[in-house]
């Protein structure tokens, strides 16, 4: 299959957006920009189209997809109840980088929810994404547009590097502004539960709906066979080809440790401004005190580490407050939870 590149600088690019909508309505796969990462979209109500997503990404069939809408009312037919908490969260954070999990209706194909009784819903704020959803005229199932396990794509080139020839089109609207995937909160149980941290922070969620549990999978490996609430969390994720090891501790100890333990093929993932201090080839992912920069750079930096090419990457440990929790969570997964305390 030839993958078409559609340029759509903004939502006024009517021809490109209409073309994307047509392909989606016809059951095709289109990678679309969102404010978080690029998504691989298909008609969420068409099981055959949804199955193509799993095939193109090599995604395990038990990992459910997020359904993207352009207006709040579009979620009504997809769920059995909405409830006050979902209404509150949507009124505060939609459109935006928040995914809300609710009990699903029969309208959502089992392929989308991977057999679960719930559905994940998101209204992206990226105007091109909203315009494409409207043009398609159907809700869009869209996981991140990477090959399963690879770092999520934050620009159209990343999408092509993974999926060229496997999908119908990519809509290029430039780099994503946030750079890590949406916050995922489940409202399917009594107490809301944070399944994946993102740009809508834990504190913002708590201010909106009161107590929020944090899924253990946010901090620890959920791959050891236990039941997990968010199936995606049990897979190694966001991984470059290199082995990533997080070193938690001061810059001085980091430099000492790396100097003492490095060998041929090693590299460093460090903060902006530290590169010159490193005894090894280095890629940077934003300034140490700027979680927004780190979020925007992280996945690109992991891809750059592979291009060095590095076999092993020692990574500086980011903070875990606010958006930092999302950065830390993604880096932990890229490292397969391998952390050395310095
Ligand atoms: O920012 C984002 O959310 C991006 C853009 C494209 O919107 N999408 C994205 O999708 O990150 P994906 O498929 O890469 O991640 C979705 C996560 C997975 O961890 C999946 O297991 C979880 O959400 N998920 C989806 N439906 C779920 C459900 N019904 N219950 C629990 N977890 C669910
Ligand atoms: Mg993903």
Image (cartoon, rainbow, N blue to C red):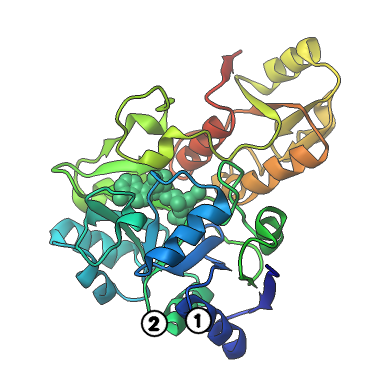
Q: On the image, numbered disc 1 is attached to which residue? A: 21
Residue 66 to residue 169: above or below: above
* Residue 267 located left or right of residue 294: right
**Considering the image in quadrants, where does the C terminus appear?**
top right
Mark 2 and mark 1 lie on one chain; the one further toward the N terminus is 1
* Residue 230 located left or right of residue 73: right
Residue 68 falls in image quadrant: bottom left
**Residue 175 image position (x, y, % from top left):** 65, 63
Which residue occupies 56% across, 19% down? 339
Residue 77 falls in image quadrant: bottom left
**Residue 195 image position (x, y, % from top left):** 34, 41
Which residue occupies 71% across, 44% down? 303
CB within 8 Å, label 2 to label 1: yes
Which residue occupies 38% across, 43% down? 62
**Considering the image in quadrants, where does the N terminus appear?**
bottom right
**Residue 265 image position (x, y, % from top left):** 83, 25
**Residue 277 image position (x, y, % from top left):** 82, 28
The secondary structure type at the circle numbered 2 is loop
Residue 338 falls in image quadrant: top right
Q: Residues within 10 Å of mark 2 (few under 14, many from 20)?
A: some
User: Is the C-beta of the residue carrying label 1 under 8 Å from the nearest atom of ligand 1?
Assistant: no
Res 149 visible: yes
- The dot on residue 216 is none
């Amino acid at each position: 299959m030839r993958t078409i590149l559609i340029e759509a600088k903004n939502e006024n690019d009517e021809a490109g957006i209409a073309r994307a909508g047509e392909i989606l309505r016809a059951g095709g796969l289109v990678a679309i920009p969102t404010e978080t990462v690029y998504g691989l979209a298909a008609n969420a109500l068409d099981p055959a189209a949804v199955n193509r997503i799993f095939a193109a990404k090599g995604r395990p069939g038990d990992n459910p997809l997020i359904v993207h809408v352009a207006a709040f009312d579009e979620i009504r037919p997809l769920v059995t109840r909405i409830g006050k908490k979902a209404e509150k969260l949507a009124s505060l954070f939609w459109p935006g980088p928040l995914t809300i999990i609710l009990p699903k209706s029969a309208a959502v194909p089992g392929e989308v929810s991977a057999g679960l009784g719930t559905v994940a819903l998101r209204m992206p704020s990226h105007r091109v994404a909203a315009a494409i959803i409207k043009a398609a005229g159907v809700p869009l199932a869209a996981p991140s547009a990477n090959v399963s396990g690879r770092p999520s794509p934050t620009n159209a080139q990343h999408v092509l590097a993974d999926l060229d020839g496997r999908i119908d089109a990519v809509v290029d609207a430039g780099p994503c502004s946030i750079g890590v995937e949406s916050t995922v909160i489940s409202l399917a149980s009594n107490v809301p539960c944070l399944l994946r941290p993102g740009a809508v922070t834990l504190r913002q969620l708590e201010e909106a709906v009161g107590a929020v549990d944090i899924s253990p999978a946010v901090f620890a490996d959920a791959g050891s066979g236990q039941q997990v609430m968010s199936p995606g969390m049990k897979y190694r994720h966001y991984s470059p080809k290199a082995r990533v090891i997080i070193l938690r501790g001061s810059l001085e100890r980091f430099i000492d440790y790396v100097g003492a333990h490095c060998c041929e093929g090693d590299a460093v993932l460090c903060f902006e401004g530290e590169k010159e201090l490193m005894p090894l080839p280095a890629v940077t992912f934003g300034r140490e005190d700027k979680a927004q920069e780190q979020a925007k750079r992280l996945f690109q930096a992991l891809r750059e580490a592979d291009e060095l090419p590095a076999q092993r990457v020692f990574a500086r440990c980011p903070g875990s407050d606010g958006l930092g929790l999302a950065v830390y969570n993604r880096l932990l997964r890229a490292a397969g939870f391998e952390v050395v305390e310095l």
